Image (cartoon, rainbow, N blue to C red):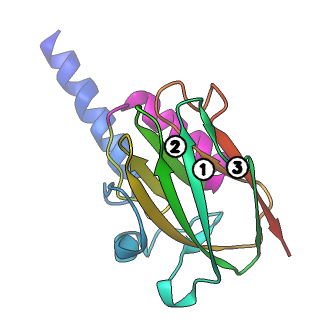
């Protein structure tokens, strides 16, 4: 029994590290760009503070919603998202394609206490504020999502509409 448990944990760890690039996870943001430079994101790429076109402020709320359910951006635009968790629960702000969100949700279900170091994900404690600087590509199916257990399923997501 102990050997089977050890093997299961080892395989899960190996699978996670293969999915996560080099196993890097934290709060994200523009200072972590060098961590994931080799990783390709369908929804764009980490942006540079010197190239920010505008800032969008978002609230993550315990009602399992963001205060904006649709966010409009332009392809090639670099956005500085300032995200504040106004609730009493932990929340995430994860930028990704529908497929990337599905992969992230699956990983979070397997490891619900995982801490992030991906440049497209913020994990925010209650009353915490964080930021992501993101340059958007030409992809229309982009979401912001919270993958804390049960939050996405309860509707905690927003669509990002990318205009060409």
Badge 2 is on which residue? 104
Comparing labels 3 and 1, the label whose residue is closer to the camera: 3
The span from disc 1 to disc 2 (Cα, nearest Å) is: 6 Å
Residue 47 is situated, as x and y percent measured from the top left of the image, at: 53, 78
Measured along the vertical axis of the image, is residue 48 above or below residue 63? below
The span from disc 3 to disc 1 (Cα, nearest Å) is: 21 Å
Say which label, 3 or 1, has the lower sequence index: 3
Dividing the picture into quadrants, the one containing residue 117 is bottom left
Image check: 100 left or right of 104?
A: right
Q: Main secondary structure of the magenta part?
A: helix
Q: Give the farthest residue toward the top.
A: 1
Q: Is residue 110 part of the magenta span, yes or no?
A: yes
Q: Quadrant of the C terminus?
A: bottom right
Badge 1 is on which residue? 100
Say how many tags the image has: 3
Q: Residue at x 15, y 18 (%)?
A: 3
Mark 3, secondary structure of its residue: loop
Q: Residue at x 28, y 39 (%)?
A: 13
Q: Is residue 53 part of the magenta span, yes or no?
A: no
Residue 74 is situated, as x and y percent measured from the top left of the image, at: 78, 75
Measured along the vertical axis of the image, is residue 43 above or below residue 23? below
Q: Which of 33/9 is in front?
A: 33
* Labelled pair 2, 3 in contact (Cβ < 8 Å): no
Measured along the vertical axis of the image, is residue 89 above or below residue 97? above
> Magenta stretch?
96-113
Comparing labels 2 and 3, the label whose residue is closer to the camera: 3
Residue 39 is situated, as x and y percent measured from the top left of the image, at: 48, 68
Badge 3 is on which residue? 68
Q: Give the farthest residue toward the left.
A: 2
* Labelled pair 1, 2 in contact (Cβ < 8 Å): yes
Residue 153 is situated, as x and y percent measured from the top left of the image, at: 62, 26
């Amino acid at each position: 029994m102990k050997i089977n448990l050890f093997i299961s944990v080892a395989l899960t760890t190996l699978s996670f590290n293969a999915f996560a690039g080099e196993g890097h996870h934290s709060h994200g943001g523009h200072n972590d760009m060098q961590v994931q430079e080799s990783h390709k994101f369908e929804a764009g790429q980490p942006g540079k503070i010197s190239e920010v076109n505008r800032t969008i402020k978002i609230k993550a709320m315990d009602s399992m919603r963001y205060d904006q359910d649709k966010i409009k951006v332009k392809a090639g635009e670099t956005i500085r998202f300032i995200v504040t968790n106004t609730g009493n629960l932990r929340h995430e702000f994860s930028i990704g394609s529908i497929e990337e969100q599905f992969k992230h949700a699956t990983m979070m279900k397997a490891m619900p206490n995982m801490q992030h170091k991906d440049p497209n994900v913020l994990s925010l404690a209650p009353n915490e504020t964080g930021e992501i600087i993101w340059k958007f590509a030409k992809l229309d199916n982009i979401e912001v999502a919270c993958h804390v257990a049960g939050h996405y399923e309860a509707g905690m997501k927003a669509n990002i509409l990318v205009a060409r």
